[in-house]
């Protein structure tokens, strides 16, 4: 079994860097760039899709895997993290640390 990180803290640090790279990439995209087709190399073909659809798939797939990890942790002594965020105004304080970790504020995200 491959274990690219010996410690969870190392994995967490790498994941944070990957998250920041993806956020920066998405922030830099224009509407025109979102609509452009990109190529995805598959084992038997090259698939062409609009960038927006591939990003939507990526985010949906991440949700899928977070759900899997949540279910796996539910069978252990480790309390699973909160995943079901509705972004209600009154719950801003509950996500403040997560937003700060990403360099965001409520005002930036909600344009208020």
Image (spheres, helix red, strand yellow):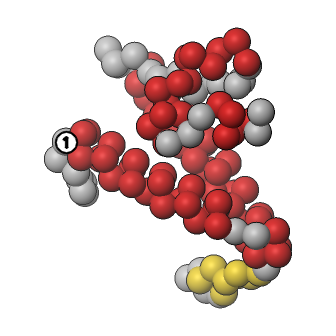
Task: Please indicate, yes or no, whether residue 91 appears anywhere in the rendered image.
Answer: yes
Indicate the position of residue 59 as horizontal and vertical percent values: 64, 51
Question: On the picture, is 36 further left or further right than 58?
Answer: right
Question: On the picture, is 105 further left or further right than 98?
Answer: right
- The residue drawn where x is 44% and y is 21% is 80
- The residue drawn where x is 56% and y is 39% is 104
Indicate the position of residue 39 as horizontal and vertical percent values: 67, 83
Q: Quadrant of the N terminus?
A: bottom left
- The residue drawn where x is 40% and y is 48% is 16
Task: Please indicate, yes or no, whether residue 49 appears anywhere in the rendered image.
Answer: no
- Give the vertical position of 79 relative to 48 (above or below): above
Q: Quadrant of the C terminus?
A: top right
- Give the vertical position of 104 relative to 70 (above or below): below
Q: Which residue is mark 1?
A: 7
Q: Residue extending furthest bottom?
A: 45
Q: Local crowd at mark 1 within 10 Å, few (<14), some, or many (≥20)?
A: few
Indicate the position of residue 88 as horizontal and vertical percent values: 73, 19
- The residue drawn where x is 57% and y is 55% is 23
For the residue pair 8 and 103, the one nearer the viewer reads as 103
Indicate the position of residue 32 as horizontal and vertical percent values: 82, 75
């Amino acid at each position: 079994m491959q274990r690219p990180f010996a410690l969870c803290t190392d994995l967490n640090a790498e994941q944070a860097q990957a998250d920041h790279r993806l956020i920066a990439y998405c922030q830099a995209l224009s509407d025109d760039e979102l609509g452009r087709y990109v190529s995805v190399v598959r084992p038997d073909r090259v698939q062409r899709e609009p960038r927006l659809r591939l990003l939507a798939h990526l985010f949906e797939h991440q949700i899928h895997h977070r759900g899997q990890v949540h279910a796996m942790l539910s069978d252990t002594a480790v309390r699973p993290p909160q995943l079901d965020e509705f972004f209600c105004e009154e719950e801003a304080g509950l996500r403040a640390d997560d937003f700060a970790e990403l360099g965001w504020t409520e005002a930036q995200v909600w344009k208020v």
